[in-house]
Image: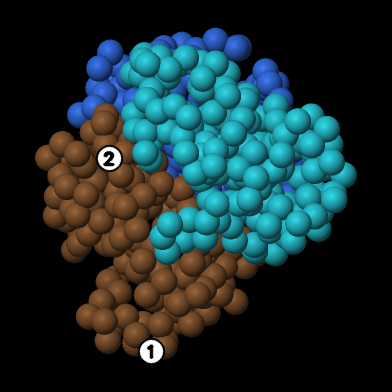
Chain colours: A brown, B blue, C cyan
Amino acid sequence: MSKVETKLNNMGIYVPDAPAPAANYVPFVISGNLVFISGQVPFVDGELQITGKIGDNATIDDGHAQARICAINLIAQLKVACDGDLDRVKRVVKLGAFVCSADDFTGQPGVVNGASDLMVEAFGEAGRHARFAVGTNALPLGCLVEIDGVFEIA
Amino acid sequence: MSKVETKLNNMGIYVPDAPAPAANYVPFVISGNLVFISGQVPFVDGELQITGKIGDNATIDDGHAQARICAINLIAQLKVACDGDLDRVKRVVKLGAFVCSADDFTGQPGVVNGASDLMVEAFGEAGRHARFAVGTNALPLGCLVEIDGVFEIA
Amino acid sequence: MSKVETKLNNMGIYVPDAPAPAANYVPFVISGNLVFISGQVPFVDGELQITGKIGDNATIDDGHAQARICAINLIAQLKVACDGDLDRVKRVVKLGAFVCSADDFTGQPGVVNGASDLMVEAFGEAGRHARFAVGTNALPLGCLVEIDGVFEIA
């Protein structure tokens, strides 16, 4: 098992099987040494734990937890892209994060830190990435957060 | 004519002239073997066929049809980037799709399938891509869908 | 001083110190010859000059001015990525622009031109880029515009 996944397991985080997309797109595309991963929603065993909007029915803590799950699902896809060996990850390059927000909610960065922190926990300095964090009025299936990513692998 | 464009024509799809942007940006930039294409709105002969929001005045089928037109416009730009030869396209790498949504509309993936399916119809396996599909409360000129893309060419 | 920065200074534009992000992400990541820069908000000396939504309390001119500041902040980060020498910039590849919009505001392209024009003023033909310009109902801290970018450097 890769050192990265061993570390995650020691933290109590288990990389799930990567869910397959339900349409004519794929979870990731490798071009050169970059992996482009599709927007991940916070599925746990194929289910959303919470739906709605942050600042309305959901709190910033809810969003933070859901962003963390998006990050775990990105890592699950990345593991497949690396043929199972997460130690091949050279850098988390960029995350693009969409936070389903009430019209007056402006705390998107704090929500997305749930994903950013997990990347650093998993990959150390190589986990520090560029990102955007923005609000939106509507996300697929009513999920709170959707995050896509670009990664550099060896 | 490229095999890809011949196939599209046989499907009754004609690649339009690529519209020029109206400001200090360009339809695409090539960096290495990647083509970054600007967000395309569903113009047909410079006009939008429908405006509004899905889940409000527009249906998911409207959105699906508009997303398909965005994909055709991406291919129109890509054709220029390839000096007219779409057979130089090695891979549709990533689509970024924004769907103008009523606050309670959560079917963005089904809308964006209109674009994803067309890419696979045009390019086969090479057309299968990473993507994000998110909602937004407002798009340029009131269009229903805007999609940008990253492509790998030879 | 680089020719690019001298030209900006002659236009009365001074590249500020690049602000550090407040969380586990970084202002930019370099992968190959591409620089991925995090979403920049229109801070001036760490403060937003205006908050709200365009089409509600803010005008398109407000948004245009704020987009221009986002572009200056992108250039500030790019300067650090280039070890201070903006003449190493080969191309502005792509901007991703989010405009905080009232539900019926559809003039996002005019707003984002504030950033696009500045890139061309700074870098000439190399400043012409691909972009998307979309609306959103909510941005961090209530800012009017957030823009991220991809740049090619030597």
Which amino acid lies under the numbered mark 1 shown in the image of this protein?
A: Met
Residue B9 in the image, given as x and y percentages of width and height: 62, 28
Q: Residue at x 40, y 14 (%)?
A: C55
Residue C26 in view of the camera = yes
Q: Residue at x 83, y 32 (%)?
A: C10
Q: Quick check: C50 above or below B127?
A: above
* Left or right: residue A61 compared with residue A41: left
The mark tally for this picture is 2
Which amino acid lies under the numbered mark 2 shown in the image of this protein?
A: Cys
Q: CA distance from mark 2 to mark 1?
A: 36 Å
Residue identified by numbered label 1 = A1
Residue identified by numbered label 2 = A100
Q: Which mark is residue C68?
A: none
Q: Secondary structure at mark 1?
A: loop
- Looking at the rendered image, the quarter that the N terminus of chain A falls into is bottom left
Q: Quadrant of residue A17?
A: bottom left
Q: Residue at x 21, y 42 (%)?
A: A54
Residue B121 in the image, given as x and y percentages of width and height: 51, 40
Observer-side mark, 2 or 1, equals 2
